[in-house]
Amino acid sequence: MTTAFEELLTGWITRQRWFAGKGRALEKVTVVSDVPLGPGLRHVIVAVRQNGHDDRYQLLIGEREDIPARLAHARIDTTVYDAVHDADKTGFILDAMARDAEVGPLRFRHVPGEVIDTSPRSLVIGAEQSNTSLVFGDSYICKLFRRLIPGVNPELEIVTALARQGSQHVAKPYGWIEIDLDGQNTTLAIMQEFLTAASDGWALALTSVRDLYASMPGVPAGEAGGDFAAEAFRLGAATAQVHRELAAAFPTGVIEAPEIKRMAETFRNRLERAVAEVPELGDHAAVAHEAFDRLADVTGPVPVQRVHGDYHLGQVMRTPTDWVILDFEGEPGQPLEERRALSSPLRDVAGMLRSFDYAARHLLADREDAAELAPRAREWSQRNRMSFLDGYADGGGRLHDDDDVLLRALELTKAVYEVVYEARNRPTWVPIPLSAFRDDG
Ligand SMILES: Nc1ncnc2c1ncn2[C@@H]1O[C@H](COP(=O)(O)OP(=O)(O)O)[C@@H](O)[C@H]1O
Ligand SMILES: O=P(O)(O)O[C@H]1O[C@H](CO)[C@@H](O[C@H]2O[C@H](CO)[C@@H](O)[C@H](O)[C@H]2O)[C@H](O)[C@H]1O
């Protein structure tokens, strides 16, 4: 029988930005774990049933007799609200990490040797996110994973390994929260150094694109002011460096013809599933099939290693000294084994190339002069894609004979993923990844 609380959550959860099940009917919400953390604060895990399959989500639930106006946006009911927004309650996380506390099944941990300052108060960042991040003062950012996948989150695994190696390109880890789910140690949250004087790559790239659009017609992208090419180059070099660090910290290998064929087959299957969900993609499927057929003919060997897996401009931040890379958890929708599997590092290169295209095009959507600006979008995208690739090679990123074919296939399979992602989350953005399948871009 559904409880009143579960009933409440049913309407609320589907409206959350981080809810991954959009586009599918919701059958049932069941509370599977409910742990009191302190007065008026509970840690709740719910199972959300869709198409007969359960996905688990993590919630921090607050209860107050009267919910103050400052928490009105977090209200779930008259007395129940999303407590991630309540700085009077979230300090619990810092306290518990500092003490390595165990609360019921929850284990709070800090990185050995680090001292956690428990004084800063939290704010939820307003990012377009698949999870929820709390910023504590100028010190920490704590990401609560919303959809829970049993197992250690690749982000925790990778960031702690790279930080231990002294990497300059990751934000220092401070702590995490874990629980056993289906018998597996599962990461619920990760807390890292908050990069105060940093800007995210997406915002920087958009500023550059805006500058170009605002410049006189005919002014080349390199002379328009706010040119991004030098940053794209530096980002390419940082990416190559992180790929080297990942190769040093985790196993590496090569794949040969049969596995490459299987990869091409996986891409075709993903395309078919995507076309079934977003029929517009069907008009472009031939271009992708051709790229995947060419990939199937590659004999290899193709080097593989741990990679970022969901690499785009929103995952990199420019600090005063260099680029820092965030969010090593792979594509949020994929199973953990797949996200942890060894891949060609070109997968990340392809992700970032797609992102330059996104940055160039997404500002066109609402503009009356979109047709005139389209060639400039192409120019900006091409210029920065080339600079990124030059920086990648300059930073020691290895490029091989079959890489054009592999890179093209990886870009198109990413664009397939993006079409589905946009259809579910931001339908007006679907034309952006669709343009990747057109020869004229
Ligand atoms: N260490 C950090 N310092 C400053 N800002 C950060 C840090 N980590 C993440 N952010 C900000 O939070 C946003 C979302 O973080 P991310 O890890 O990508 O979350 P998600 O997996 O939910 O997308 C980033 O785009 C960035 O703006
Ligand atoms: O950052 P997340 O792990 O949540 O990644 C998901 O959301 C991203 C959008 O926020 C999405 O990225 C796509 O949009 C970006 C612009 O907003 C663009 O720069 C990327 O190139 C594009 O893929 C990502 O695919 C998704 O997994």
Image: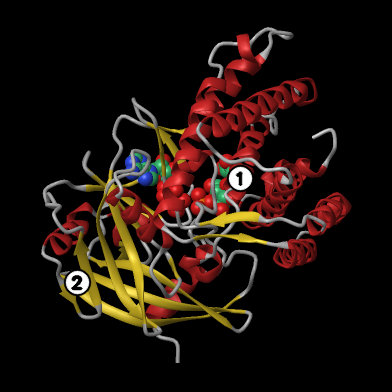
Res 49 quadrant in image = bottom right
Label 2, ligand 1: CB separation under 8 Å: no
Res 266 quadrant in image = bottom right
Percent position (x, y) of residue 290?
86, 52
- Pick the residue in front: 196 or 3: 196
- Residue 331, label in figure: none
Q: Is residue 68 above or below residue 386?
A: below
Q: CA distance from mark 2 to mark 1?
A: 39 Å
Q: Is residue 127 visible?
A: no
Colour mapping used in the image: secondary structure
Contact, CB < 8 Å: mark 2 with mark 1? no
Percent position (x, y) of residue 141?
29, 48
Res 200 quadrant in image = top left
Q: Is residue 207 above or below residue 175?
A: above
Could you classify mark 2 by the number of other residues whose Cα lies within 10 Å: few (under 14), some (14-19), or many (20 or more)? some
- The mark nearer the N terminus, 2 or 1, is 2
**Amino acid type indicated by mark 2:** Leu
Instruction: Give the residue at x 46% y 35%.
Output: 238
Q: Which part of the image, by quadrant, shows the C terminus?
A: top right
- Residue 37, label in figure: 2
Label 1, ligand 2: CB separation under 8 Å: yes
